[in-house]
Image (tube, helix red, strand yellow):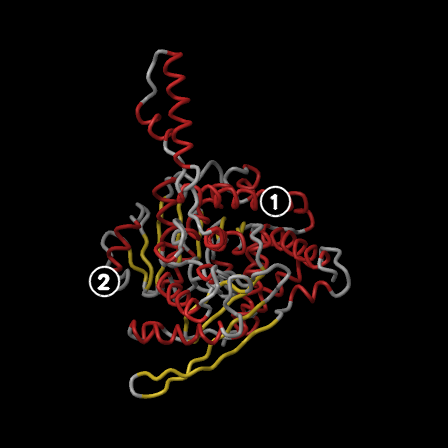
């Protein structure tokens, strides 16, 4: 272990350090800071499943950080390094994230110590259903109390298994589908959920570039067009963020970092082509037309305009922070910058768009899915055709008065009523815009106090949670 490693705060310590830095700037009642900081409860379960001729024992967690609003919300991750400290830190981030983007949930998080790749699909289903049963019977999965979602190592498939397990146990719960979000569309999911976190990164960056003073502080200018991007992690979040930013906004992805190394090309990397190559070859090594870098983490230090760490915690740490050259970092993953690295980067003048904001697209669209499940009707069903009829009438009137036809493409687009996907994207865009505007206002007003975007996000979130507790009589 190097001296830097010895001084490196853990992920949980990093969250606490960043929280404490902001809380010290607020005038909270005595004891309120500690009440908000600590997790309310953490449940640890060890259960057995008979597999391959023997009983295999698994360890899982579900942490509830804050119940200032209910239900509490947070994903379930499957990874062989899941531990209590990590789950509690992630649950805390969920509390602050939901408060920041005004999603009416408390924070929670779950995890199961398992490598999904070690098991066949039918085995993984049995393990998932048993884990779900252990949580359901303690109301740690419940539409009104605790609503999980996908996280690292889980997806629509696992959420469908959990939703089915809940329905089989709670047969009289009419809102059973709302017990988890991130489900497939055919069992109560919502259009746009799979892309939501990556789409939120895109919308968040767009809003950042609508604030010229903020952009200038990062030593950048203009808009997103032709900005050079490095993405770490081409999973769900990194893939969608890179795809949308390159296809919709004209960004150039110059490097991608994955488990088996990194590739770099100043000409730009086509994300769809790379994704197909990875599916065929199991990694990025050998991808044609790009330089291969065996030590993938070194690519974090390459020259670029925007660095998007979308993989694991602590990707940027005391050991490499000084060599990071990106003027703007967007934390698409949870906790990719440690507290120690954060201090170094801020001193260098790097602007960091923090995780609790940057990756809030997932929980925002999960909220829309939960509302859809509780209302038992898809968005757009009641008004879409009425909107089409009204727009058709309006265009007809304009054409009659002017004597000129509308351009065909414009007419077609205007006449289409909003479907579920359009409404979800609109709601997500509005959420990301509003939250960034709140952060930017605090950042600019209190920059002389050393407030950056992360501290601004914490200041807003902590105050909202404190106000909720005060309303409850604490």
Alpha carbon separation for disc pair 1 and 2: 44 Å
In the picture, measured across the screen, residue 159 lies left or right of residue 24, that is: left
The one nearer the camera, 341 or 35, is 35
The one nearer the camera, 312 or 129, is 129
**What label does residue 438 carry, if any?**
1
SS label for mark 1: helix
Quadrant housing residue 121:
bottom left
| Residue 279 in view here | yes
SS label for mark 2: helix
The one nearer the camera, 361 or 273, is 361
In the picture, measured across the screen, residue 58 lies left or right of residue 8, that is: left
438 over 81 or under it: above or below? above
Q: Quadrant of the C terminus?
A: bottom right
| Residue 331 in view here | no
Q: Position of residue 180 (x, y in %)?
A: 45, 62
Q: Position of residue 395 (x, y in %)?
A: 39, 21
The one nearer the camera, 430 or 8, is 430
**Residue at the location (74% across, 60% down)?**
473
Q: Residue extending furthest front?
A: 172
340 over 123 or under it: above or below? above
Quadrant housing residue 258:
bottom left
Task: Tell me which numbered mark, 1 or 2, is placed earlier along the sequence.
Answer: 2
Q: Which residue is mark 2?
A: 281
- Mark 2 neighbour class, 10 Å CA radius: few under 14, some 14 to 19, many 20 or more: few
- Mark 1 neighbour class, 10 Å CA radius: few under 14, some 14 to 19, many 20 or more: some
């Amino acid at each position: 272990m190097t001296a830097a490693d010895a001084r490196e705060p853990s992920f949980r310590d990093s969250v606490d350090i960043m929280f404490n830095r902001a809380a010290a700037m607020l005038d909270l009642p005595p004891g309120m800071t500690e009440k908000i900081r600590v997790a309310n409860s953490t449940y640890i379960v060890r259960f057995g499943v008979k597999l391959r001729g023997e009983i295999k024992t698994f360890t899982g967690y579900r942490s509830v950080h804050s119940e200032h609003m209910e239900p509490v919300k947070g994903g379930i991750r499957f990874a062989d390094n899941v531990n209590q400290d990590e789950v509690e830190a992630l649950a805390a981030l969920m509390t602050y994230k939901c408060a920041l983007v005004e999603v009416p949930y408390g924070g929670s998080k779950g995890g199961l110590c398992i490598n999904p790749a070690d098991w066949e699909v039918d085995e993984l289903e049995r393990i998932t259903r048993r884990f779900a049963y252990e949580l359901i019977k303690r109301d740690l999965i419940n539409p009104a109390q605790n609503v999980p979602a996908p996280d690292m190592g889980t997806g629509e498939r696992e959420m469908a298994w959990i939703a089915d397990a809940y329905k089989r146990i709670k047969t009289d719960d009419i809102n059973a589908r709302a017990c988890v979000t991130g489900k497939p569309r055919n069992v109560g999911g919502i259009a746009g959920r799979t892309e939501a976190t990556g789409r939120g990164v895109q919308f968040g960056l767009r809003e950042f570039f609508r604030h010229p003073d903020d952009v200038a502080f990062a030593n950048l200018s203009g808009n997103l067009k032709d900005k050079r991007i490095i993405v770490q992690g081409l999973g769900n979040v990194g893939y969608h963020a890179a795809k949308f930013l390159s296809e919709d906004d004209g960004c150039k992805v110059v490097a991608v970092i994955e488990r088996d190394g990194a590739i770099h090309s100043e000409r730009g990397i086509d994300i769809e082509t790379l994704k197909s190559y990875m599916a065929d070859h199991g990694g990025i090594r050998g991808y044609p037309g790009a330089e291969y870098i065996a030590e993938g983490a070194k690519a974090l230090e390459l020259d670029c305009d925007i660095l998007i760490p979308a993989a694991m915690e602590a990707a940027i740490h005391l050991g490499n922070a000084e060599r990071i050259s990106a003027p703007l970092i967007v934390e698409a993953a949870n906790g990719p910058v440690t507290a120690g690295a954060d201090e170094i980067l801020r001193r260098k003048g790097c602007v960091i768009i923090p995780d609790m904001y940057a990756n809030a697209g997932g929980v925002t669209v999960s909220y829309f899915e939960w509302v859809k499940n509780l209302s038992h009707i898809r968005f757009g069903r009641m008004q879409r055709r009425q909107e089409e009829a009204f727009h058709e009438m309006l265009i007809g009137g304009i054409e009659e008065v002017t004597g000129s036809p509308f351009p065909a493409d414009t007419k077609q687009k205007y006449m289409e009523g909003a479907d579920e996907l359009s409404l979800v994207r609109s709601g997500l865009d509005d959420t990301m815009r509003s939250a960034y505007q709140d952060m930017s206002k605090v950042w600019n007003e209190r920059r002389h106090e050393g407030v950056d975007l992360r501290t601004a996000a914490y200041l807003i979130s902590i105050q909202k949670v404190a106000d909720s507790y005060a309303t409850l009589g604490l």
